[in-house]
Image: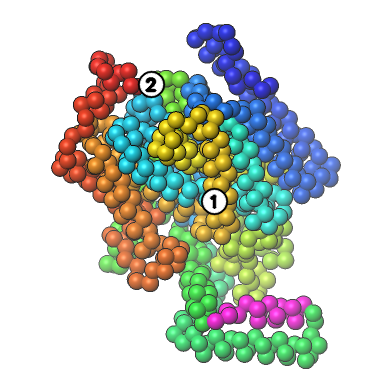
Amino acid sequence: MAGMFDVKAGTSGAAATAAFKKNLNKVYKWYTGGFLVFLVFLAIFEQMGLSRQWIGMIFLLATVGLYAGIGIMSRTTDAAEYYVAGRRVPAMYNGMATGADWMSAASFIGMAGGLYLSGYDGLAFIMGWTGGYCLVALFLAPYMRKFGQFTVPDFLGERYGGHVPRFIGIVAAILCSFTYVVAQIYGVGLITARMVNVQFEVGIFLGLGGILVCSFLGGMRAVTWTQVAQYIILIVAYMIPVVWLAVKQTSVPVPQAVYGYQLEKVTAKEKLLANDPKELEVREIFKKRSADLAEKLKNPGPALAADKAAATKKLEDLKAANAMGSQVSAAEKELAAVPKDEAAAKVAWTRAKAAADTKSKPLNGMPPHANQFAGDPKGDAAAQKTYDTSRRNFLALIFCLMVGTAALPHILMRYYTTPSVKEARESVTWSLFFIFLLYFTAPALAVLAKYEVFHVLIGTPIDQLPAWIASWNKVDPTLMSITDINKDGILQLNEMSIGGDIIVLATPEIGGLPYVISGLVAAGGLAAALSTADGLLLTIANALSHDLYYKMIDPNASTARRVTISKMLLLVVALCAAFVAAQKPADILFLVSAAFSFGAAAFFPVLVLGIFWKRANRMGASFGMVAGLGITVYYMVMNQPWLRGIFGVTSPVDLWFGILPISAGVFGVPVGIAVIIVVSLLTPAPSKHIQELVDHVRYPSLKGTAKSLVH
């Protein structure tokens, strides 16, 4: 078993490759069959009385144990194996591994949830991420494979000749990869907490063990074969519930073909809910609550004192009247929830006012699902301005996601693992195919889940709501909560708060499927988060060990020492990311999109110009990366609420052209391109040697000294 991912010794070229592929096909056929048999047996045991807690535990232990086993069997201390899997991953399997690497918690968990909450606007994620792979295939993957380096900073150091571009590349790779991996570990904590019913923070560190065993021992080699296994789990887990919902609602098992019909029904229901008397009543209550909070914020000191006095008096009156213990306990919680001081009161009341403002709007603040953009191009001046701003943000987000996809270091690293340039290009095609399977399904899942919520949950007596609502509320009240604000005992849409991050995970329960399918979906989400986290942590550790330590500090370091240092750094980075994720810094989609803006601004200009413009030089690349990344970070810090709080920014939010901070890369990319071009033209050209190298990479038929440098 230990050699199942090795080429047999003593075999030659083509024969060895054929034998290797045949062995892989056999291994993963057995794996897929075994996985399906495992599901059937677990479903049988559930019918025999196996508890949900045990089902979740079995899924967690079985999947993480499987990934750990692959990691152990793929252990290595060889540098080429550890950093680029020996450059012998076949195109189809590299496509599957890239698909898993790409199917992060944001894609698996957050994307359908984003579509559920934002409707048409959420399609920007699908269009941007899919379009990005076209850029990878056309402009980057084949050419970077010809350069033959291990990492993106490694490419920058070789192409631009010097440690400065390499070092800036290291910093940028760590920034975007760390931001991205925090989102993945947050997703891991969320899923693990739901699977085995533990606290969110405990779930994070349980999942962290799964991440480390996949990548710690075998580096890229272990990560590659683990990701292939993870892709199989995640795509099966994603498809089963959405196919079931399609059959349940339409009797057609092709959700991608029928969700348009369900969208018509959802649109009709939206119109009814927008004008329903009970919904209007609830919205008025929240509108009044918002007004009351606004008054408190005008004079927070006296308002806080009044709240404390009222809560204290209520508790004393209940105790004096020998009230029921539950009433006294509730009053004690109310008193404890009163902010401790004026500063805390301002923060709490501002947050509560924002929530009340959202809930005072029709459809719980969600736009009509089929509306292209907010506002109205034929309305008054305000409606037209809203429409233009919404459309501008939609296009800006697509741009950032496309360009960021083409420049993310952990994705580009995957194309260093193929045997040849031809297979690098083929593996991009396979990547697109495997990603398409999920992305084509996400819009259908969002619509089908919304149909269930609107037609089954809304209008149900609150004491008859399904148990999964209380279960998710226990995991995290910000993701699922019910407040019967008008006290009628019936659930209205605006009385339910549901986070986008649980839509996919809760879909089996929403559709009434057996709990074993919920466990399967959680395992799929865990596979998605783990697979991306593995690649990201490896990117960070390799940037530090290979590019910083080996290339810049100790070029004479032995292979064993380099790999050992990479493993130590991987452990440290993983623990730091887990600590940050435990603070719940922001929602998954924002963190991921921020990483894309960072990657787009820092890497896309310098990579594309480095390949297609041989005049780009070291000074231009260095200043371009700093300028592009700098303007992107500045815009986010000045305008994103969580970052404003972290950096203590108190100046008013100033959005340029109305662009939201999630798309800050739309400013960084053109700035980076302009700075690289201007500085390169004002400073000496690269050496003749580097220019010949660029010519050879772009035009392989050219002969010259550079050819010997391309590995």
Question: Magenta includes 355?
Answer: no
- The circle drawn on residue 577 is 1
Could you tell me what secondary structure mostly forms the magenta stretch? Answer: helix
Viewer-side residue, 503 vs 106: 106
| 339, 324: nearer the viewer | 339
Quadrant housing the C terminus: top left
Would you call the spot at circle 2 few (<14 residues within 10 Å), some (14-19), or many (20 or more)?
few
Q: Residue at x 43, y 49 (%)?
A: 175
Measure the C-alpha gap from mark 1 to mark 2.
34 Å
Q: Which kind of residue does numbered mark 1 sit on? A: Ala
* Residue 115 % position (x, y): 49, 51
Callout 1 touching callout 2 (CB < 8 Å): no
Give the mark nearer the N terminus: 1 vs 2.
1
**x and y percent of residue 447 in the render?**
53, 49
On screen, residue 673 versus residue 17, left or right, reads left
Magenta extent: 326-341
